Amino acid sequence: MHHLDLVKLSQLMDRTGGSRDLRVAVIDGPVALDHPAFAGQRVFEVDSGSKAACQSQTNIACFHGTAVVGVMAAKRGFGTPAICPDCTFLLRPIFVEESDDGDVMPAASPDDLAAAITASVSAGANVINLSASLGRQSSRGDRQIESALDHAAQRAVLVVAAAGNHGTVGSSAITRHPWVIPVVGCDLYGRPMADSNLGSSIGRRGLTAPGEGVGTIGSDGKPGTFHGSSAGAPFVTGTIALLWSEFPDATAGRIKSAVTSAGARGRITIAPPLLDAWGAYRSLSLN
């Protein structure tokens, strides 16, 4: 089954490509902004010291940031879902010091992540897509992240976060925050991938979205695929962007409720339900 059909996104994408008034912040690695798929797109840097563009196109941080943004912001027809290309995108890289090892994803400090969340809110984001591998965590770092997420909630900025791919059961300061929508990557049958992080907070408030072989644009200019919860998160973020573009007067709480309630939630489980984009649209249409 096609990734978009799996989560019933095709019908919603046929209605709209999003609105330029809807601002999606992406906290991730730098992006290959010179790729033709981004030509003419509304993609801007947010307070990161002119480091939104890739310095080394072969580095994993550059590939990761480009892949995530490509799923949402690329022009359609480049082999990536291109979910909401007509929206405005705000880039806030936190993996700006790229690793010397091109195959190792660099980690962000809680300080950098909290600052990026706050900067994205200040820049006017409506929704934040977060796929971050944190370095050594501490109670102080957790408090910083929780405070930044509290700020996003107070400003009604939705936060979608990749749950991670360490095959663990539990939570983090990000995934256990009540305002965050954690995302688990799934295979082509909608089953959580074997290395997915799961947990009670993820199961209660999160969603599952395509995380296997997701097509995207490569930072080297060639098409590619990527995997995991980082691939799944932009499906949820892109769905939110399209829904909010179609229902601009809806509150953040209403959008969040429509997206998370549309999935078939049954018994309490550590694995969240599959995203149902069209179900969320129908829910908003009826209310």
Image (cartoon, grey):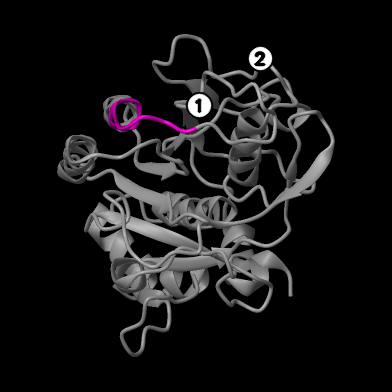
Where does label 2 land, which residue? 55
Q: Which tag, 2 or 1, sits closer to the chain's start?
A: 2
Which residue is pictured at 70% across the width and 18% down the height? 56
Mark 2, residues whose alpha carbon is within 10 Å: few (<14), some, or many (≥20)?
A: some
Distance Cα–Cα, label 2 vs label 1: 12 Å
Where does label 1 land, which residue? 95
* Residue 77 appears in the figure: no
Could you tell me which secondary element the residue under label 2 belongs to?
A: loop
Assess whether residue 110 is covered by the magenta stretch: yes
Where, quadrant-wise, is the C terminus in this rendering?
A: bottom left
Question: Is residue 108 placed above or below 241 in the rendered structure?
Answer: above
Q: Which image quadrant for residue 76? A: top right
Q: Amino acid at mark 2?
A: Gln
Asked whether, in this view, residue 12 is left or right of residue 176, the answer is: right
Predominant SS along the magenta part: helix
Assess whether residue 58 is covered by the magenta stretch: no
Magenta part of the protein: which range? 107-114
Q: Amino acid at mark 1?
A: Phe
* Residue 201 appears in the figure: yes
Q: Position of residue 168 (x, y in %)?
A: 44, 64
Asked whether, in this view, residue 70 is left or right of residue 126, the answer is: right
Which residue is pictured at 31% across the width and 32% down the height? 110
